[in-house]
Image: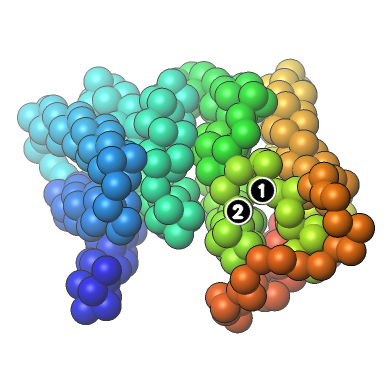
Amino acid sequence: MNPLALSLILTTLLAGTLITMMSSHWLTAWMGLEMNMLTMIPILMKTTNPRSTEAATKYFMTQATASMMLMMALTINLMYSGQWSIMKMTNPVASNVALMALMTKLGSAPFHFWVPEVTQGVELTSGMILLTWQKLAPLSLLYQMATYTNTNLIYLSGLLSILIGGWGGLNQTQLRKILAYSSISHMGWMLIILPFNPTLTLLNLAIYILLTLSIFMILANTLTTSMSSLTLMWNKTPAMTIMLMTTLLSLGGLPPLSGFTPKWLMIHELTKNNSIIMPLTMAIMTLLNMYFYMRLIYYSSLTILPSTNNMKMTWQFTNTKHTMMLPTLITLSNMLLPLTPMISMLE
């Protein structure tokens, strides 16, 4: 892509997200979401082939439907209350429709069907933006709506997201689809804690973005998109293999890694509010995710590609990609647990 066009597209993407995050007026927030959606399409179609075109079309149709639903909710709210403030949506129909529209934009169940298909059809870098940056704007709106949303709908969607995020990824061999299902599962955790403690939703989002960025950068650096090519990693880049292993364990939420922090604080918050069955169900369903993360670790770290050559020499071309941000991201992805007491004080 032309560098000038790419810089313009990325600037508009940044502006769209910031407009949505900073606005307290529904119309400007909606405009920011539209800017975000329209600039995402050329990013998804960065390499022109039928799969990326299909993915961009699916993305556009889903997001356009969600935007239409959101505008309908805003219009209903305007008719009943006469105002555009995000903090006050008194009409229950408008509130529920807006919630479903934002869930569709986030890709949480039962509006999740587009996420694995779109992520699989695009490049790793485009998939990385789709599963990280594109979550910021809709979640910032949900954060502002947390006081008056339908909690039953949020709990149902959250539990379904965790279940489908674990179940859907079990039989996958493509890494982008696995990361898409992982994203759906993490959205479930973020949604469920939203009515109890919105700050924990933001903490979970920040750590999820760190972990997902780290994994996508490792995969892009080693040019790996499927489980079968993961077996080459030990041969090519042993250091990257260890980084991938620890980051996947952190994504699964195992102590003493960073990914354990949000899950620990969320389960603590839920039990503090006399909710015992829900965190237990969430923790059990998250084991499905842990299973396919362990599969990825087994393929990358414990398997070497069958070879007749006894000398494990690297036969691929030398990688010229730069990994300036990767050490910082890996450190943050794995070593934030000691900061948990300080984080819990910020709530």
Left or right of 187? Residue 283 is right
Figure quadrant of the C terminus: bottom right
Mark sitting on residue 224: 2
List the residue tagged with mark 1: 229
* 10 Å crowding of disc 1: few (<14), some (14-19), many (20+): some
Tell me where residue 164 sits by quadrant: top right
Q: Along the polypeptide, which appears first: circle 2 or circle 1?
A: 2
Which residue is at the front of the view, 316 or 124? 316
The amino acid type found where label 1 is placed reads Ser
Looking at the image, residue 262 lies above or below residue 292: below
Relative to 337, 195 lies left or right? left
Q: Is residue 180 above or below residue 23?
A: above
**Where, by quadrant of the figure, is residue 62 drawn?**
top left
Proximity of marks 2 and 1: CB atoms separated by less than 8 Å = yes
Q: What residue appears at the point 71 percent right and 62 percent down from the top-left corner?
A: 333
Rendering coords of residue 272 (x, y %): 74, 35
x 41%, y 26%: residue:
113
The amino acid sitting under disc 2 is: Thr
